[in-house]
Amino acid sequence: MIDKIKNADRSVLATLSIGLAIVFFLAFNALINTAFTASRLDLTEDELFTLSDGTKDLLAAIDEPIDVRLYYSRRFNEIGPDIARHSTRVSELLGEYERLSGGNVRFQVFDPEPFSPEEDLAVSDGLQGLPFDQSGELVYFGVAGTNSTDDADAIGYLAPERSPFLEYDLTRLIHNLANPDKARVAVLSDLPLQGTQFDSFQPWLIVEGMQQFFDVRFMDREDKELPEDTEVLLIAAIHTINDSLAYNIDQFVLNGGRVLAFVDPFAESMALAGPAAGQLPPPGVGIAAMQPLMAAWGVEMPAGQFVGNSDDAVRVGFPDPESGQQVAVDYVAWLTLQGERFTQGDTVSSQLQRIVVSSTGAILPIEGATTTLEPLIFTSKNSNLMSAFDIAQQPNPIALIEKFEPEDKSYAIAARVSGDIKSAFPDGPPAEVLEAAEDAEALKAAHLSESKVPLNAIIVGDADFLADRNWAQVQDVAGQRLTVPSANNADFAINALDNLRGSQALVGLRGRGFSVRPFEVIAEMRQDADDKFRAREQELLASIGTIEQNIEELQREEQATGVPFTAAQQDEIDNFRGEMLQSRRDLREVQRSLRNNVETLENRVRVINIWAVPVVIAIVALLLALVRRMRRARFYRAALH
């Protein structure tokens, strides 16, 4: 047999070898897919395809079927590869959800072509169709789900821009279907959230928004217990808390209850309660009421001090004390926060664009705290803590900005606080609670001295954050109230409540990286090429502006005096115009060089991407062939000798 193999045609052996290699490869893949179905290897930098422990726990706990339908119009592939890669990631993650749930999450993919039953199903599921071209054809990219009792939830459009929060969005959808009842939110506040007799008891707009998504229960200041089955407690500018209620809040949090607290050094919106409420409480009262609980949570807020900031200050009109004229001045107590003032790694703050606050406090960690403070909204470094007494009576924006001295420090004005904590009542239930209890000994035995579940609370330094005037305008259209948001204050509050009401799977999730990553080196090279010529471009533009200004001054002088230009002046103008023409030519050359440099860079990278790998493979193949020939030559020489 060995002799036959040696004497066989080399081409036949090569063909058989290739065939056997293909068979072995397919068999190896089949074995791997069968024997290692639960094994995954995620080599992406941000572990895009590795689900969090919270998501895995949620999926493992599902005990009823949940049908998830992914709608993806294949025509999206014509737009570009980025959205196609994003759809692939969505599909693969949902496949993981199905596998980890033991089949309780049942996943299907549909291509809703125009006028097809799949499109009708997508529309009935509440998906948002996007116009694809001028013909009006709609395309779809969203996900919908239903549970065994026909509760439904959907994500109308899976925007690639939101890809860092894809796991959060999908896990939230599954969680809502597995737990379809509205979360109960208890509200404890001294603010006139439900309106007063002076506005015909018209609730604040934020209350209407909350009631759309949650089962909202309002508490009285005299209440000593939280409403039954409370999942999230919202506290807003509460100025007094009795011992019984404070203790019950403490135990609620230690048991895993969630809190969204708006703690304000000076709640200006209390004035909306009208004369019956008396004068505004002095600065610091709201902080004092919450201070014992906040101290147990590892945070503090300087009493009677607000964050002044010059970069984000709202410009207001104010009479100048010297001239009596109305002037525009930056009011450093009122801030409009935009751009880079929001943490992008947290689902609550990542999509914010504009937040308006009034005399907000600063949220600071206490030294030695066992909790972690993660800023969600923060100021620029041109900030300082200022006395709230300066704005309590008759605020003077001009005097305030003269007193303002930035200290090169950024302050968190909304933050997530998480971690293990101890009770604010280390000695057990207070006397007031024990006296009212039917069985004081049982109550003492049930007392929690430390958290059973890590704290997860969101604290905001401004209760005026919720006031209509800070985020919305109301218009009367055909007898109906139309709300026109001007800021994202309500979005933040609803997002925070929705995030906190979720399971530990949701509150523990943070944003991942993007599945579509830019070529950072290329971007840097392009920026270097741009910077190389941009300075010269700006220099030439400034020169042209100066020349044009000189010519205009000479022409105005001629018009004012009525005296024609002298020969020397005309020569000067001609020289100016010659310089301007030359500067324009230089500018065009610089701009052409800029474009050529960037295009050359892109072409070079494109050539490398297309040809580098084939060239490397060809060189390696040639080297291997050369080595093989040299070995064969040595073999024949040895055989001859």
Image: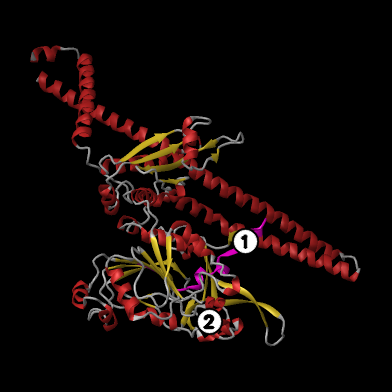
Quarter placement of the C terminus: top left
Q: Identify residue for label 1.
A: 539
Res. 410 image quadrant: bottom left
Q: Amino acid at mark 1?
A: Glu
| Residue 388 as seen in the image, left or right of residue 135 | left
Tell me the residue at 89%/71% (across/down).
Answer: 561
Image coordinates of residue 139 in percent, x first then y, are: 51, 37
Image coordinates of residue 25 in percent, x first then y, are: 22, 27
Quarter placement of the N terminus: top left
Badge 2 vs badge 1, beta-carbon distance below 8 Å: no
| Front-lying residue, 299 or 18 | 299
Tell me the residue at 34%/65% (across/down).
Answer: 228
Mark 2 or mark 1, whichever is nearer to me: 2
Res. 494 image quadrant: bottom left
Which secondary structure lies at badge 1?
helix
Q: Is residue 1 magenta?
A: no
Q: Identify residue for label 2.
A: 277
The answer to whether residue 311 shows anywhere in this view is no
Tell me the residue at 66%/58% (across/down).
Answer: 479
Write the start and end of the magenta stretch as one range: 457-481
